[in-house]
Amino acid sequence: MAALRYAGLDDTDSEDELPPGWEERTTKDGWVYYANHTEEKTQWEHPKTGKRKRVAGDLPYGWEQETDENGQVFFVDHINKRTTYLDPRLAFTVDDNPTKPTTRQRYDSSTTAMDILQGRDFTGKVVVVTGANSGIGFETAKSFALHGAHVILACRNMARASEAVSRILEEWHKAKVEAMTLDLALLRSVQHFAEAFKAKNVPLHVLVCSAAAFGIPWSLTKDGLETTFQVNHLGHFYLVQLLQDVLCRSAPARVVVVSSESHRFTDINDTSGNLDFSRLSPSQNDYWAMLAYNRSKLCNILFSSELHRRLSPRGVTSNAVHPGNMMYSSLHRSWWVWTLLFTLARPFTKSMRGEPVCPSAFVQVFAARKSAAHGVKDICSQASNCAPN
Ligand SMILES: NC(=O)c1ccc[n+]([C@@H]2O[C@H](COP(=O)([O-])OP(=O)(O)OC[C@H]3O[C@@H](n4cnc5c(N)ncnc54)[C@H](OP(=O)(O)O)[C@@H]3O)[C@@H](O)[C@H]2O)c1
């Protein structure tokens, strides 16, 4: 109990006892709401204390959350073979107190991914990270793997991917990590990846879309599209479409799309405000590498928001994150000028390991409290998906 208090997980006390006719329930993403059977109404606030709450932590071992045909969340205790509408985590709720520190205050630039994941057990969770052989993708994959998740590194180059797997195994030989081929510049490869993943017959709880091309010279993919656009946005878009059914079956599940603040410095509309498709996959004459990157990052955000709107009612949330500016990964490798700029900026920007705010950003999405909900900068959209009526 002391440990729970230390972690801010106060036990529910008697002041929280509900008046007759009321019942406490939870949404798919852990928000507590109150149902009054007499008046047939629901509300977020506790009828006596007026407080809003959410459940803390994961379900106990052997429990699973499911949704019935009316959209009502229920819980299956596989060990004792019973089913209940009562969320076992209701014993440990935390107040949604707006005066308490927000997630941004809770986790700052000195927070490591490990800090955020401390005490979390991802055993049984399956995580796919694209572009996981280097940079932010690698740190994210490693962080999840070291906390028990089964992590699949989805990479275009198997040699680099296998080396990344070995580096994680060196840190913890029991880590459940594997590499699978995914070339986002080739839609057929995306399709093959999705088929191979589905053939494994495992759930998918987290899909982190981290792979990206940055500042590359103009080229067309074999599918006939400008490469930055296809790798950064369209390939991921297609991947999510193909894995959507698995994500929904694995709910609660999450998609995290790694975008960038640089999405601000462009637009994809023409002068009359209509979507200009030619800007998405421009010809060589209309190509500027930085603009292409920025546009693809804007697509990331628009995609993530729309995905969240569509899938959150089915228990799949989507968030876009900005990991930090000019972090010294391999992103700059396409041109020596980028390398020079990233090198000059390096002392002033976040590092991958020392202050890995970027992987933190992903895991913040996991640990996110409601106050982290909005703003594209770190995490955009963390809406509750089962609001009281
Ligand atoms: N670093 C920053 O300052 C920064 C800032 C804002 C946003 N971001 C975003 O953070 C994310 C991760 O970037 P990073 O900094 O970690 O860069 P990184 O180290 O270069 O990682 C990018 C990854 O994407 C992979 N990739 C490239 N083309 C691919 C393709 N066709 N198919 C599959 N994978 C492909 C790369 O694989 P290979 O090793 O095989 O090339 C690499 O693993 C990106 O979405 C980036 O836009 C980074």
Image (cartoon, rainbow, N blue to C red):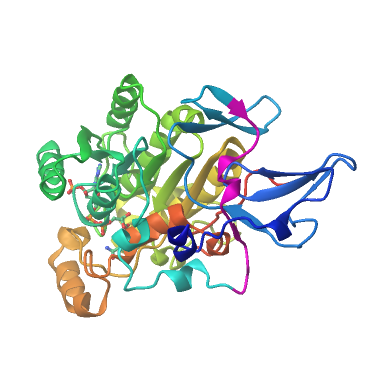
Specify whether 9 is left or right of 294.
Answer: right
Tell me where residue 101 appears, x and y as whole percent: 53, 73
Depth check: give the residue in front, 370 or 136. 370
| Residue 298 visible (yes or no) | no
**Relative image position of residue 273 (x, y in whole percent):** 60, 58
Q: What residue appears at the point 64 percent right and 37 percent down from the top-left corner?
A: 86
Answer whether residue 271 is magenta in the image.
no
Left or right side of 281 for 60? right
Q: Residue at x 12, y 39 (%)?
A: 162
Q: Which residues are magenta?
A: 83-99
Compared to 321, does 208 lie above or below?
Answer: above
**Location of residue 119 in the rendering, given as x and y in whole percent from the top left corner:** 36, 54
- In the drawing, does residue 275 fall left or right of residue 389? left
Q: In the depicted view, which residue is nearer to us: 95 or 11?
A: 11
Q: How many marks?
A: 0
Q: Position of residue 118 (x, y in %)?
A: 34, 57
Q: Is residue 85 magenta?
A: yes
Name the residue at 31% across, 73% down: 110
The quadrant of the rendering that contains the C terminus is: top right
The answer to whether residue 77 is left or right of residue 172 is right
Q: Is residue 166 visible?
A: yes
In this rendering, the answer to whether 306 lies above or below 66 is: below
Q: Give the camera-side residue of 286 and 176.
A: 176
